[in-house]
Image (spheres, rainbow, N blue to C red):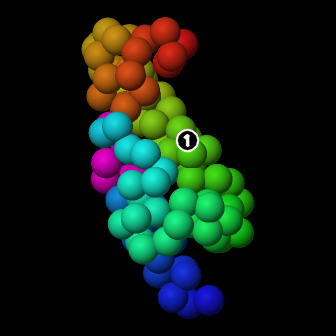
Amino acid sequence: ALAYDTTIATAVRFMEEHFADAIRIEQVAALVCLSPDRFTELFRQRMGRTPSDYLRHVRLEKARLLLATTDSSTEEIARLSGLGSAAYLT
């Protein structure tokens, strides 16, 4: 179980450092040497949400921070937070 905690911590760290990139869950699973299904299962057990939900949460929190602290356009904030477009952000 401890090894899985380290594995999930590695995945979380990667997602938090690369949230603005076009990350695919398959890519994160490969990083920690697990199949996408097994990775998603373990991640949900440890974190209480799926990897996709967690990544969306990280991106939305970054967008929220940028909206509150910058004068950047919605389009720029969406790009910087990894959400892609202003339409998706709104």
Seen from this angle, which residue lies furthest bottom? 2
The residue closer to the viewer here, 60 or 71, is: 60
Report the residue at 45% width, 37% height from top: 59
Q: Is residue 43 left or right of residue 66?
A: right
Name the residue tied to disc 1.
57
Dot 1: what SS? helix
Find residue 45 and report its horizontal and vertical position in percent: 71, 69
Instruction: Give the crowd class for mark 1: few <14, some 14-19, many >=20 residues within 10 Å.
Output: few
Find residue 35 and report its horizontal and vertical position in percent: 53, 66
Q: Quadrant of the C terminus?
A: top right
Segment tinted magenta in the rendering: 15-20
Query: In the image, is residue 60 above or below residue 74?
Result: below
In magenta stretch: residue 79: no
Report the residue at 38% width, 44% height from top: 23
One can see residue 61 in this view: no
Find residue 53 and report its horizontal and vertical position in percent: 61, 44
Query: In the image, is residue 64 above or below residue 36?
Result: above
Q: Amino acid at mark 1?
A: His
